[in-house]
Amino acid sequence: MCDSAATLPKTGQKSHTRVAGKMVLLAFAMFGFGYLMVPLYDIICDITGLNGKTGRVSIESVASAETIAEDRQVTVEFTASINQGGSWIFRPDVKTMSVVPGQLYQTSYYAENLNSNAVVAQATPSVTPFSAAKYFNKTECFCFTRQAFEPKGSKQMPLTFIIDEDLPVNIDRVTLSYTFFRSPEQS
């Protein structure tokens, strides 16, 4: 009996070591999944067209466009939200704009850092209805790069966009929404 009692702790220790190893492996897998979540999400959005990600075009390609449907008007609504934990003022300068597909338009958003320390932030866009996202193209956008703010600093952030003439005729209202958040590199 003494022999079998002496082997129990070793078996239990092996079991604990095996469980601890699996837990460490699980922690690494969870970290890896979290790290890859954004690129995977972007790929899925590109494939399916979900999330309303907008396109990006050059001003030269807009200037070379031949046809403009001047008799068609589309209302663009601009919205802004702040991710949790942000001490910001973030809003569009114009809430709605009536646009003609095929023409270039400019507007801007206002952002103010209410923190007493410097902050780097990023904005992510989304377009609804989702089916309109591939027709909404930006030539200049504050969302293309991270934005640095001094303590209590503010700035006007430009947005230049065009709605493609191929926007389906049943879509007469498009909402461009930005979510502003502190850059992950700074957290």
Image (spheres, helix red, strand yellow):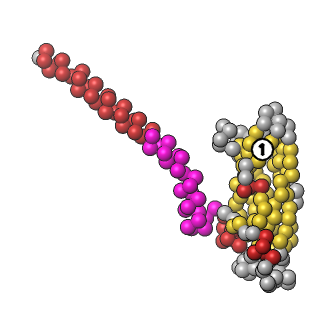
The image position of residue 127, as x and y in percent, is 71, 64
Q: Is residue 92 visible?
A: no
Q: Give the side of residue 114 with respect to residue 49, left or right.
A: right
- In the rendered view, tell whether residue 8 sits above or below residue 177: above
Let me know if residue 17 is in the magenta part. no
Q: Give the side of residue 2 with respect to residue 155, left or right.
A: left
In the image, what residue type sits under mark 1? Ala
Q: Residue at x 79, y 33 (%)?
A: 117
Let me know if residue 44 is in the magenta part. yes
Q: Give the side of residue 103 with respect to residue 31, left or right.
A: right
Q: Residue at x 86, y 44 (%)?
A: 154
Q: Pick whichever, 95 or 38, lies toward us.
A: 38
Which residues fall within the magenta stretch? 28-51
Q: Residue at x 79, y 84 (%)?
A: 66
The image position of residue 71, as x and y in percent, is 85, 83
The image position of residue 26, as x and y in percent, is 42, 40
Q: Quadrant of residue 138?
A: bottom right
Screen quadrant of the N terminus: top left
Q: Quadrant of residue 136?
A: bottom right
Which secondary structure dominates the residues rendered in magenta? helix
Disc 1 on helix, strand or loop? strand
Which residue is under mark 1?
A: 148
